């Protein structure tokens, strides 16, 4: 009954929509999209998600900076997050997510099953 | 008597002609001079004097002024007017101690005069003096002739053309070089006025040298020569003055065509210099290219971001559709096609990023044949669609060695894509592996750069197509980053550059060439692994690798 909440932050609106459709289609997640990095922290405060996907490269504020701000905010620092990246290649991440210096990375283009696997792994405890 | 005397005209003995209409005078003269070392001639009229002078060419003529029919002045004028007699020196015999007469005589070319009545000693002394003068003059003339000969020898052997002109700028002598340079022989040149010549600069230089009495130098003249090409020359005109009197000028012409030849040689040398300068420039360009490659890293990041986002959208969109839509046989194929396209595009971008990062190779012992088989598998779909046949000749004895299989796959993916694009539709893609001992002819530019030598035992991979081949002018640039002949958006021009980079990281070489029968061929060479001796001992190797 209690759907887990996922916030998607990426400047590509079509991408966040596709991710949302795939996640919602499972019926297990409540998803919200945010297409501006600078608004990500505020959206997180309002929505209070269980998991945030952050695009690393965004024009106004990068995902890494958003993550820093999340960690500095006592009310948000517990939220889990994963990065979406176009730069790190699939071979480095393998299938699914990769841990690079403690952070989780997901290489674009993300496949549905990869996405769902990562979400399950990060939320499934 | 006159005849007699004339007959005895000797070479060295001065001959003296005495002319008087009064026999007594002639006798006195005769008495005065006889017994000395002279040949004596006599004439008793002006007419006879001219006749004898002409015949005997006397050195000295003692000439009476007062004679009937033709006076001495007239005789002298005629003597001087006739080239045959003008050289005989004339001494007037004058009864009148008249200054005007003497001056007139001297003006007519006489050298002296003796007053009547004659004093035999005085006559003898005068004649003596003049004969000495004559001898000296002869000696001088002789010396001059010799000097002239020397001068001529010098002038003749001179490379410079020398032209002597008189004060009127009329040509007085030319040397052979001048004839050659001016393109005319002496016969035509002597006496010619320089103003008849071209170019204007030559005329002006001579005119000025004579008028201003100073040397004029003109560099870089272009002399017209009848029926031949212009001759480049330098010109120097030096006025010749004898005790303040302008005698003429010496014109020295220097033929520059020899120098031009030297200059042409210099030109060739500087051509070579320019050539090596260009080569340096090219080397520099390559350095710049290499530096640019570093910036490919930044570019790659941008490209990756731009490409991967849309790819991700398509990927997830497809996945979603596959989830929510009931797919029949055909739409499953369509989805598969689209999946293929996405992974291909992803591979290309990945290659770009990999390339730009210059990461270390992830080496594993691997079989080249397996890499090829895997790579072919990736493009199989594309090949079938384009009706391109694949022929493989994979030698089972090619040894395994260390490769980064992913990167090597990228290499062959690039080569296969290029081949397919070249053939467009219908054709044959041939892939062959073998182990060979290479000959000089097997080594391309890159192979030599890498350091492969004839006699080396190497793994050779060939990827051949039946496309149009490569334009000769493109052959050298194929591997340059960003070099492409494909339309904007169809090729990045990085394919071969990435490919060579990966092959080089493996210690291998890749060269592209045209096949004799048409189409292009990529030739890759790799050294078998260090421990290949062991592997070679294995009689058969699993072509699928481990
Ligand atoms: N098999 C071939 N036959 C004819 N021409 C070729 C062949 N392979 C390469 N070329 C020529 O070499 C050029 C450079 O090739 P390269 O792979 O570096 O770039 P590209 O194919 O144009 O673009 P990209 O591979 O980045 O999409 C091509 O544009 C083409 O003109
Ligand atoms: Mg290419």
Image (cartoon, rainbow, N blue to C red):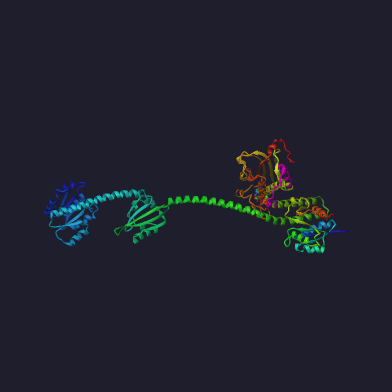
Pinpoint residue B409: horizontal percent, then vertical percent. Answer: 71, 46
Quick one: which residue is furthest to the left in this view? B24
Q: Give the answer, above or below, for where B537 lies relative to B242.
A: above
Residue A68 can be seen in this image: yes
Pinpoint residue B168: horizontal percent, then vertical percent. Answer: 32, 59
Residue B369 falls inside the magenta stretch: yes
Task: Please give the name of the residue rendered at 39% of the width and 59% of the height, measured from the top-left corner.
Answer: B201
Q: Give the answer, above or below, for where B398 lies relative to A2.
A: above
Foreground: B150 or B42? B150
Report whether B361 appears left or right of B161.
right
Residue B522 can be seen in this image: no
Pinpoint residue B329: horizontal percent, then vertical percent. Answer: 81, 50
Q: Main secondary structure of the magenta part?
A: helix
**Quadrant the N terminus of chain A occupies:** bottom right
Pinpoint residue B429: horizontal percent, then vertical percent. Answer: 69, 44
Foreground: A26 or B486? A26
Report whether B44 appears left or right of B285.
left
Report whether A95 appears left or right of B98.
right
Dividing the picture into quadrants, the one containing residue B320 is bottom right
Residue bounds of the magenta highlight: B353-378
Report whether B192 appears left or right of B366.
left
Residue B296 falls inside the magenta stretch: no
Quick one: which residue is furthest to the right in this view? A1
**Quadrant the C terminus of chain A occupies:** bottom right
């Amino acid at each position: 009954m209690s759907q887990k909440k996922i916030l998607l932050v990426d400047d590509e609106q079509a991408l966040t929509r596709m991710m949302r459709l795939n996640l919602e289609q499972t019926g297990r997640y409540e998803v919200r999209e945010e297409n501006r990095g600078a608004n990500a922290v505020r959206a997180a405060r309002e929505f209070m998600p269980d998991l945030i996907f952050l695009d690393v490269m965004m024009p106004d504020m990068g995902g890494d900076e958003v993550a820093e701000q999340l960690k500095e905010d006592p009310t948000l620092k517990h939220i889990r997050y994963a990065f979406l990246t176009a730069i790190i290649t699939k071979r480095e991440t393998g299938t699914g997510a990769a841990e690079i210096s403690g952070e989780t990375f997901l290489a674009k283009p993300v496949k549905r099953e990869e996405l769902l696997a990562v979400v399950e792994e990060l939320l499934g405890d | 008597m006159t005849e007699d005397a004339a007959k005895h005209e000797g070479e060295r003995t001065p001959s003296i002609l005495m002319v008087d209409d009064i026999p007594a005078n002639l006798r006195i003269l005769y008495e005065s001079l006889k017994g000395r070392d002279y040949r004596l001639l006599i004439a008793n009229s002006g007419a006879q004097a001219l006749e004898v002078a002409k015949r005997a060419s006397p050195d000295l003529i003692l000439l009476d002024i007062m004679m009937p029919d033709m006076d001495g002045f007239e005789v002298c004028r005629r003597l001087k007017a006739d080239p045959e007699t003008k050289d005989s020196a004339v001494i007037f015999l004058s009864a009148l101690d008249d200054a005007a007469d003497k001056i007139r005589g001297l003006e007519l070319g006489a050298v002296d005069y003796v007053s009547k009545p004659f004093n035999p000693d005085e006559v003898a002394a005068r004649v003596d003096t003049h004969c000495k003068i004559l001898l000296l003059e002869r000696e001088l003339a002789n010396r001059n002739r010799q000097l002239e000969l020397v001068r001529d020898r010098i002038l003749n052997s001179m490379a410079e053309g020398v032209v002597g002109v008189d004060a009127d700028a009329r040509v007085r002598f030319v040397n052979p070089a001048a004839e050659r340079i001016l393109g005319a022989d002496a016969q035509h040149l002597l006496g010619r006025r320089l103003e008849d010549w071209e170019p204007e600069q030559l005329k002006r230089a001579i005119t000025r040298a004579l008028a201003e009495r100073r040397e004029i130098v003109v560099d870089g003249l272009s002399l017209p020569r009848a029926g031949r090409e212009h001759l480049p020359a330098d010109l120097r005109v030096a006025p010749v003055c004898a005790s303040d009197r302008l005698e003429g000028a010496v014109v020295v012409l220097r033929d520059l065509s020899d120098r031009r030849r030297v200059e042409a040689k210099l030109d060739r040398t500087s051509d070579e210099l320019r050539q090596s300068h260009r080569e340096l420039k090219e080397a520099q360009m390559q350095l710049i290219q290499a530096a640019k490659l570093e910036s490919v890293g930044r570019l790659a990041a941008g490209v990756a971001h731009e490409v991967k986002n849309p790819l991700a959208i398509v990927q997830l969109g497809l996945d979603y559709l596959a989830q929510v839509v009931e797919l029949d046989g055909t739409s499953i194929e369509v989805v598969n096609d689209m999946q293929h396209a996405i992974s291909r595009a992803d591979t290309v971008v990945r290659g770009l990023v990999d390339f730009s990062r210059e990461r270390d190779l992830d080496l594993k012992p691997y079989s080249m044949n397996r890499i090829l088989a895997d790579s072919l598998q990736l493009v199989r779909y594309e090949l079938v669609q384009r009706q391109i046949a694949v022929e493989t000749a994979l030698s089972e004895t090619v040894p395994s060695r260390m490769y980064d299989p992913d990167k090597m796959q990228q290499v062959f993916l690039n080569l296969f894509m290029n081949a397919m694009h070249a053939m467009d539709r219908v054709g044959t893609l041939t892939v062959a592996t073998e182990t060979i001992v290479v000959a000089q002819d097997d080594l391309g530019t890159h192979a030599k750069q890498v350091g492969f030598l004839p006699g080396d035992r190497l793994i050779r991979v060939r990827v051949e197509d039946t496309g149009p081949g490569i334009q000769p002018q493109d052959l050298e640039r194929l591997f340059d980053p960003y070099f492409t002949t494909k339309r904007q958006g169809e090729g990045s021009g990085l394919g071969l550059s990435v490919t060579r980079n990966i092959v080089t990281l493996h210690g291998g070489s890749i060269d592209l060439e045209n096949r004799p029968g048409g189409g292009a061929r990529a030739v890759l060479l790799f050294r078998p692994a260090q421990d290949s001796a062991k592997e070679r001992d294995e009689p058969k190797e699993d072509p699928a690798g481990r």
